[in-house]
Amino acid sequence: MFYVVASTRGAEVLVSLPGTVYRGILCSDRWVVYLYHSGRMQLCWAHLKRNILDALAIVARWFRLWYR
């Protein structure tokens, strides 16, 4: 596991990482530049949880409006 601190989130940072093929699992927040990674990917659990909670809040609002 390693982390990279860069001044940009551009694709050039991902491509410039050591090694031509990263055999691990890239954990990302679904930023578009991570589509350049051809290996296995995993969504960041915190981002996924936030998206699920947002969707549940929308569904709850729909039901509140429907019951009115």
Image (tube, rainbow, N blue to C red):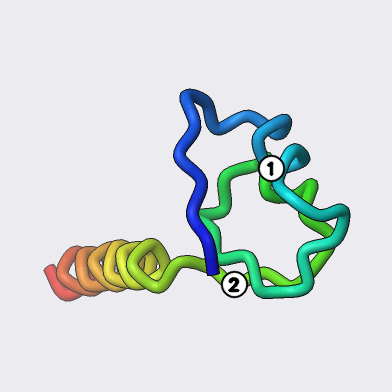
Report the side of 64 relative to 27 (left or right): left
- Which residue occupies 22% across, 72% down? 60
Front residue of 44/21: it is 21
- Which residue occupies 31% across, 64% down? 50
Cβ atoms at labels 2 and 1 below 8 Å apart? no
Q: Quadrant of the N terminus?
A: bottom right
Helix, strand or loop at label 2? It is: strand
Measured in 3D between alpha carbons, the distance from the residue under mark 2 to the one under mark 1, in whole angstroms, is 16 Å
Q: What's the amino acid at mark 1?
A: Leu
Q: Quadrant of the C terminus?
A: bottom left
Report the side of 14 relative to 43 (left or right): right
Task: Give the image quarter of residue 26.
Answer: bottom right
Give the percent coordinates (x, y) of residue 30: 57, 53
Helix, strand or loop at label 1? It is: helix
The answer to which of marks 2 and 1 sits earlier in the sequence is: 1
Q: Which labelled disc corresponds to residue 14?
A: 1
Tell me the crowding category of disc 2: few under 14, some 14 to 19, or many 20 or more residues within 10 angstroms, Cα based: few
Q: What's the amino acid at mark 2?
A: Gln
Dot in front, 2 or 1: 1
Give the percent coordinates (x, y) of residue 2: 52, 61
Give the percent coordinates (x, y) of residue 46: 33, 67
Front residue of 68/61: it is 61
- Which residue occupies 28% across, 70% down? 53
Residue placed furthest toward the front: 18
Residue placed furthest toward the top: 7
Front residue of 59/8: it is 8
Tell me the crowding category of disc 1: few under 14, some 14 to 19, or many 20 or more residues within 10 angstroms, Cα based: some
Residue 8 lies, with reference to residue 63, above or below; the image says above
The residue indicated by pointer 2 is 42
